[in-house]
Image: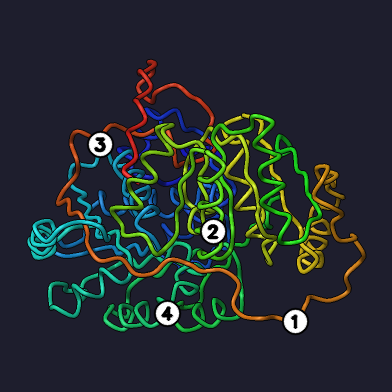
Amino acid sequence: MTFEELDLNDNVLDALYDMRFETCTPIQEHCIPQILEGKDILGVAQTGTGKTAAYLLPIMSMLDDGGFPHDAINCIIMSPTRELAQQIDQAMQGFGYYLDSVSSLPIYGGNDGNRYDQEIKSLRLGADIIIATPGRFISHIQLGNVDLSKVSFFVLDEADRMLDMGFSEDIMTIAKQLPPTCQTIMFSATMPPKIEQLAKTLLKNPVEIKLAVSKPAEKIAQKAYLCYEPQKLKVLEDIFKAGNLNRVIIFSGKKQKVKEINRALVRMKINSDEMHSDLSQEERDQVMFKFKSGATDVLVATDILSRGIDIDDITMVINYDVPHDVEDYVHRIGRTARAERDGVAITLISDQDVYYFQQIERFLEKEIEKVPLPEGIGDGPEYKTALRAPKKGGARGSRGGRQKYGQPRGGRNRNAKPANQHAQGGKSGRSRNGHNRRKPNKPASNA
């Protein structure tokens, strides 16, 4: 289905054509008509399926058509992290390039008090769309800076991740202040019981749209090493001795382990850095800037980086430990082999992780190549069929926490150009007025 076949505002369609997006992704095809009809939505879809456009396009289209108050907040979009909030805001600037009447205000952590004051002023003036992280938005609510009485749309993006990060109470606090007529749209990559319960609480007769968990791109060469925990650093050293040092992400589920791995890499004279929730927002921004610019070769990270981050030229992903959920594995290795490039995904499997890796292979419906260990480090564990998971010894992994400061923007950014991204999958097409327009440049990310 093409975007032209949907009942979207002409100004939105003009921006899509400028960005060379013509064809909907499946999640967009199913969601956009239902949102335009005013239905609550429960969508189960991964990052990269085009879900951001699936809710932004119809909401922005309806706001531009009119009938909503100009001095009030009309839409709230909740994001678990600042990085995702920035990407949503960037997408909106592209899709809304011709929407003079629709304004946006991103609210997230990492900025100073002056910007917080600007944020308060913008909130009191009213912004059509607020894109916020829960912790920061709650602080505005508690200080009486926000009036939610006229909100028409409430969007939860990556709801499962927000619950994992401990934002359940904040979400309910916000939801209780919304008018009963508010249309609620919830997206989640997974559907655990806690998400089902949240959906029952927040959604009114929702339309459920579920996309099956997609398998990793065929261009990803997946390999694995069977090794005991003390052998893992030796395996890493051997991998990097082969010269595989360009644009690598190493994932671990535990932030303490991330720190240990990075210290070990530094001792190996490898140009590496680390990303986890113990870093301040300013430190996280600096780490991301250095990695994106090529100043850092290897980034060691928790799953805070596995979803919602767009970096197209990652050559290798290494799972230092095996994710316990298939979806997490898919998200992690999906950081490589993007934009039609090739990529390599290597997983280090300890004796405690055999069961979980076999679950991944069962989902993939194939056996992943097991690479022999380097000479001199001994034998690894056997890859025997594991019928059950090992007994848990505590929570595996750490997810990010709340963020404190935000950067306001009242009204549309007139310097922004439509971004050739985020709609995810639209085919190239001609502009709607019959002539080819120059493809706008992709704006730089602030993540």
Residue type indicated by callout 1: Lys
Q: Earlier in the sequence, mark 3 or mark 4?
A: 3
Task: Give the Cα separation between the discs numbered 4 and 2.
Answer: 31 Å
User: At x 30% / y 72%, what residue is drawn?
Assistant: 135
Please state if 277 lies on the left or on the right of 93 as rendered: right
- Nearest to the eye among marks 3 and 2: give it: 2
The earlier-in-sequence mark between 2 and 1 is: 2
Whichever of labels 4 and 1 marks the residue nearer the N terminus, that label is 4
Q: Residue at x 39, y 23 (%)?
A: 431
Identify which amino acid the numbered label 3 is placed on.
Answer: Tyr
* Whole-number angstrom distance, CA of label 1 to CA of label 3: 56 Å
Task: Read off the residue under disc 2.
Answer: 260
Question: Which of 164 and 289 lies nearest the eye of the viewer?
Answer: 289
Q: Where is 91 relative to 78, above or below? A: above
Amino acid type shown at disc 2:
Glu
Which mark lies nearer to you, 4 or 2?
Answer: 2
Tell me, for residue 98, which label it has, or none: 3
Mark 3 crowd level (few <14, some 14–19, many ≥20, 10 Å Cα)? many
Give the spatial CA distance, label 3 vs label 4: 36 Å
For the residues marked 4 and 1, what is the alpha-carbon distance in whole angstroms? 27 Å
* Of pointers 4 and 2, the one earlier in the residue sequence: 4
Q: CA distance from mark 2 to mark 1?
A: 24 Å
Residue 140 in the image, given as x and y percentages of width and height = 18, 72
The nearer-to-camera label among 4 and 1 is: 1
Look at discs 1 and 3 and give the one toward the viewer. Answer: 1
- Residue 391: image tag: 1
Residue under pointer 4: 168
**Label 2 neighbour load within 10 Å: few <14, some 14-19, many 20+:** few
315 or 144, which lies in front?
315
